[in-house]
Amino acid sequence: MHARATDATAAVDTPLVEIRGLTKSYERGNQRVEVLHSIDLDIAHGDFVALMGPSGSGKTTLLNLIGGLDSPSGGVLRVDGVAIDDLNSNALAAWRANTVGFVFQSYNLMPVLSAQRNVELPLLLTDMGANERARRASLALQLVGLGERAKHKPNELSGGQQQRVAIARALVSDPMLLICDEPTGDLDRQTADEVLTLLQQLNREFGKTIVMVTHDPKAAEYAQRTVHLDKGTLVDEPTPH
Ligand SMILES: Nc1ncnc2c1ncn2[C@@H]1O[C@H](COP(=O)(O)OP(=O)(O)OP(=O)(O)O)[C@@H](O)[C@H]1O
């Protein structure tokens, strides 16, 4: 995996994520409900941002927009200079595969596949050969401290180990941006701290930009700063840690 130091240096003045006047509405019955109201937010290359706020405040909605899993209703959303809401669905899928790694609360591993095969999955979307896929997946598993567990199936691993496999899967295509939705929500304190330490290491040593939704103020302390959403609006200045 590359630290992407050169990318960061080249683009030092341009935020990785630029959000201006971003809105998102959903149809509910015959009503249109706006769940994000004119969000402005910059996320620099190499930042680690915790996104906090009450349930229903729009955290996952905002995270999914940044990761290109959903499209905004209005405003500007650029990631690495690309206006991702202008991409058609094929181009957006290719962009996601190259640019973003996703980590979810519930790991979302395939139960019948070994850790190694789970980590290889995103590379099946690329034209990479089988040997290179295997090599990359092994490296990613080593990076998260699970090199010895490559042949284990998810049900032979603890929750924390499964989340590490999910992080290795998110990293295997060497994305610049990691999107994490409550990554430690199902883990006990000690295991959560281990997973958060890993995310912090990926941020500090490998320059991964991380946006992490969390309800847990202790988890947010691992980030460089916290932004707070309330009822679809960013409520105060970002908190540096
Ligand atoms: N696909 C959808 N259709 C309609 N409404 C939606 C949809 N997705 C989210 N919402 C609504 O948008 C609002 C924000 O939801 P979101 O999941 O972003 O909140 P959240 O802050 O992540 O909440 P939580 O902390 O409980 O996960 C909620 O009122 C939710 O019901």
Image (cartoon, rainbow, N blue to C red):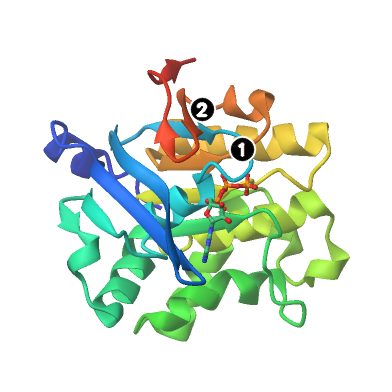
In the image, residue 21 above or below residue 124: above
Q: Closer to the camera, 108 or 208? A: 108
Q: Is residue 174 visible?
A: no
> Where is residue 33 drawn, in percent x and y?
44, 56
Look at the numbered discs 1 and 2 and tell me whether their residues touch, using CB distance below 8 Å: no
Q: Position of residue 119 (x, y in %)?
A: 58, 69
Residue type at tag 1: Thr
Q: Please, what secondary structure does the residue beneath circle 2 have?
A: loop
In the figure, residue 48 lies in which quadrant?
Answer: top left
Gap in angstroms between the C-alphas marked 1 and 2: 11 Å
Q: Quadrant of ligand 1?
A: bottom right
Name the N-terminal-most of marks 1 and 2: 1
- Please tell me whether mark 1 or mark 2 is closer to you in this view: 1
Local crowd at mark 2 within 10 Å, few (<14), some, or many (≥20)? many
In this figure, which residue is indicated by the disc labeled 2? 223
Does 140 sit left or right of 225 as displayed? right
Q: Residue at x 26, y 38 (%)?
A: 5
Q: Is residue 230 above or below residue 91?
A: above
Q: Is residue 227 left or right of residue 180?
A: left
Q: Disc 2 beta carbon < 8 A from ligand 1?
A: no
Question: Taking the image as drawn, is residue 113 in sight?
Answer: yes
Outermost front residue:
30
Q: Position of residue 161 (x, y in %)?
A: 76, 53
The picture places residue 188, in percent across and down from the top left corner, at: 84, 38
Q: Can you identify the residue that label 1 sits on?
A: 214
Going by the numbered disc 2, the residue's amino acid type is Ala
CA neighbours of label 1 inside 10 A, class few (<14), some (14 to 19), many (20+): many
Residue 59 is labelled as none
Towards the viewer: 22 or 47 = 22
The residue sitting at 41% across, 64% down in the picture is 173
Relative to 143, say whether 135 is above or below.
below
